[in-house]
Image (tube, coloured by chain):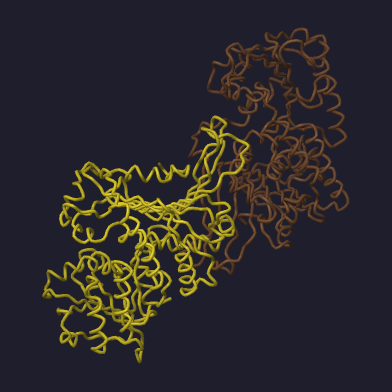
Chain colours: A brown, B yellow
Amino acid sequence: MALPACSIVIFGATGDLTKRKLIPALAKIPLAKSTEIVLIGRRADNAGLRNEFLAFTKDAKIAKRFRYIQMDFNKFDEYKNIEVKHDNRIFYLATGPESFPTITKYLERAGLASPKPARGWHRLVFEKPFGYDLQSAQKLNHELTQCFTEDQIYRIDHYLGKELVQNILVVRFSNPIFERLWNGRYVDNVQISVMEQHAVGSRGAYYDQSGALRDMVQNHLLQILSLIAMEAPTTAESGDVHDEKVKVLRQLRYVPDSLVLGQYAAGSISGKHVPDYKDEDGVGKRSRTETYAALALAIDNQRWMGTPFYLRTGKATGSSYAEVVMTFKRGSSLFHGKNGQPAPNKLILRIQPDEGMRLQFNLKGNDCCADPVLMDFSHKAEFGMNTPEAYERLLADVQRGDQTLFSRWDEVEHAWRIVDGLRKVHGKTGKLHAYRAGTSGPEEAKKLLARDGRSWHGQ
Amino acid sequence: MALPACSIVIFGATGDLTKRKLIPALAKIPLAKSTEIVLIGRRADNAGLRNEFLAFTKDAKIAKRFRYIQMDFNKFDEYKNIEVKHDNRIFYLATGPESFPTITKYLERAGLASPKPARGWHRLVFEKPFGYDLQSAQKLNHELTQCFTEDQIYRIDHYLGKELVQNILVVRFSNPIFERLWNGRYVDNVQISVMEQHAVGSRGAYYDQSGALRDMVQNHLLQILSLIAMEAPTTAESGDVHDEKVKVLRQLRYVPDSLVLGQYAAGSISGKHVPDYKDEDGVGKRSRTETYAALALAIDNQRWMGTPFYLRTGKATGSSYAEVVMTFKRGSSLFHGKNGQPAPNKLILRIQPDEGMRLQFNLKGNDCCADPVLMDFSHKAEFGMNTPEAYERLLADVQRGDQTLFSRWDEVEHAWRIVDGLRKVHGKTGKLHAYRAGTSGPEEAKKLLARDGRSWHGQ
């Protein structure tokens, strides 16, 4: 489907997000011929800045679409400088969230955006953090919805743009063999891991106000969980999918005593020394911010009764990867495994890197036992390197008006309820377990599964 | 488990089977130190013959175990020349089946073999053809069991020694996810294909008396079918497994009007001209022998009610391969496939070449449809080239006394009942469809599935 001609207006154009993600993605997707990109920032326009815009893309042709406007977006008067060619308009807020209410209010007041445009469409795009907790998120949402309606708002969670995450619905709902096994009768537990090898680095000041629960669990992990756990939607259309995701989020229940929070201590990653989290730039010397979180959630419905969902995410861990591991219940077996009963069957959805799917099953090993082996599907090997990056997919979807892969407000709201609850639990116990940078996380996360007679995949 | 010391006595030692299969296999398995190989043939012993014995193995050390005895095994007097060192004895009949009764009778009479040896064990090994039809098979078996009891008899079906065939039981009964899907509620149909690229070549005289039904369906195909379709045995032990296989064979029912027989006509394979079957050496000019067979079988039990098993086998086909394809029923799908509904899920067990397993499922293609992709497990890639060849495995099993991978008499008997029935059907219609050598077989085999709204995998 060809993308419609539109004006893409990016606030905060001189920031990292624009230069590293948005411009490279826009350079790759097949924009309509007359689509323009209006870049708005405070810095003066000059050749140096222009070069920065192109630093992360190989396709300099995108520059023909650029129009740079230098302005202070806190000053209403300067909005008159914004000219847009098309009635179809995308306003991408690549600024700090504290500016969102001001920008949207002035956009509407200046007549650039309207909840009901007379011609074309007006869409608002921004990324997390969607607030700091439920209350602040509600406040922010209230302010934004003064100027934009929910169906104009595209909340980006870039994990939802990843190929394997998009594929969760197709895997589940076009493959009868998977769908038939996809419930608590057959699934023993589900593990969702999003691990980041890098430490906070230059983002210490931001991160220290956030932490793993707010920065990762509230959005990426709960979004993946809801896609994995949701009931079949009536159709694959956006509204129906979001309805089912919200239902699952509402049925989520924290498993008591399961929250494990950690903070990294000095260590080394790939041979490089990593300082103690508290010694990172911008981090308070007495910081209690968690850089690691693991927990168990139950889902109170028929499908998932008795099947825990284990979540974990951390910074400065041994490696970077994101995956979902569905471990199936054991059955009676005619054959022994190497150490007693055979390994359980597992379905592994690798989100990054090396996106693909794997099925662990047992075959006769050389010693006649039932040995676990992996059946493998590599997305790259099958579809080549041409699969679009997350931002390409998402920016194209905004232009198409497809909200499926964006977070709807009620999802955000329910995810905050859960995370606020977890933070309250933490407030009472206050435990924060140290783990050495470069390891898989605190020992307590292993104990969390061990007490249920389970273990993290790959451990 | 170390193999016990024994004397392996091979009748027909100068034939192809011994030189091409038995000696190379014996050279590879870890025989006990004092195990000897007694080679019996009519030809005079000389250096030329000794070299022939070693022509197909790289390990000349096996020659130290050889003792060659020149004799006419139709003459009882000459059996006194047979000396064996061990009480544990294997008698391998690598001769034509017409000699089996004579050899076994004389072995017993000469005191070399006994149904109840005072010390050690005596075992008899031979290969198909196990008779020519039910009646001749019963006669042969009656004669052999005058001298050997059923638990001393090892009927080799070399397909049962193949890694993936051995693995069918492990796949089914140590993997709950497969076992749960392994029934007619989820499986739409099962296809068993054993295709041979080579024409009859020098085996025309033998083959023309046999044909695809007797040469392939009666043994290899029905053996594979019974492993795929059987109920879970009480244990993985030989007796229990054979009991369940027999149960399935007894429940097999020919689907009326489904038998398609064919005979190859001149064509070309890999660029080489292949003559009309009737023009092959040793084949009658008016031969009505089938070189191709396809048919549908139903299994009258709860598990497989409504799920047909399609079998096909042929000579001089486009390529050589053996595989089982289990096609799962379609479910409702939220997504379209490229041509209407998405492709069905399939589980493919590749027996040869490139043994391994594949699962066909749907993922989002580049055009947003549900596109079929393959998840792959390659046996060679996982376990290396070290997996034993069929004969190695089977010859080791004879020494261990494990009858699991051999055909028990009642299996042979019931398989003949089925094949005799099929031949009777054919006798009435008499149709024999020509197909060009180098193609996949007669068009009628495609129509057989098409009339059920199905198609052969890969076609």
Observer able to see residue B276: yes
Q: Residue at x 57, y 30 (%)?
A: A388
Image quarter in which the C terminus of chain A is found: bottom right
Above or below, B352 against A57 in this view is below
Q: Quadrant of residue A411?
A: top right
Check the image and name the residue furthest to the bottom. B118
Image quarter in which the N terminus of chain A is found: top right
Q: Is residue B451 left or right of residue A309?
A: left
Relative to the observer, which residue lies in front, A183 or B205?
B205
Q: Is residue B219 left or right of residue B187?
A: left
Locate residue A290, reporting x and y percent.
77, 46
Observer able to see residue A271: no
- Counting every numbered tag in the picture gives 0
Locate residue A418, reporting x and y percent.
82, 43
Locate residue A65, reporting x and y percent.
60, 13
Above or below, A285 against A17 in this view is below
Relative to the observer, which residue lies in front, B349 or B137?
B137
Q: Is residue B209 left or right of residue A66?
A: left
Locate residue A179, reporting x and y percent.
63, 47
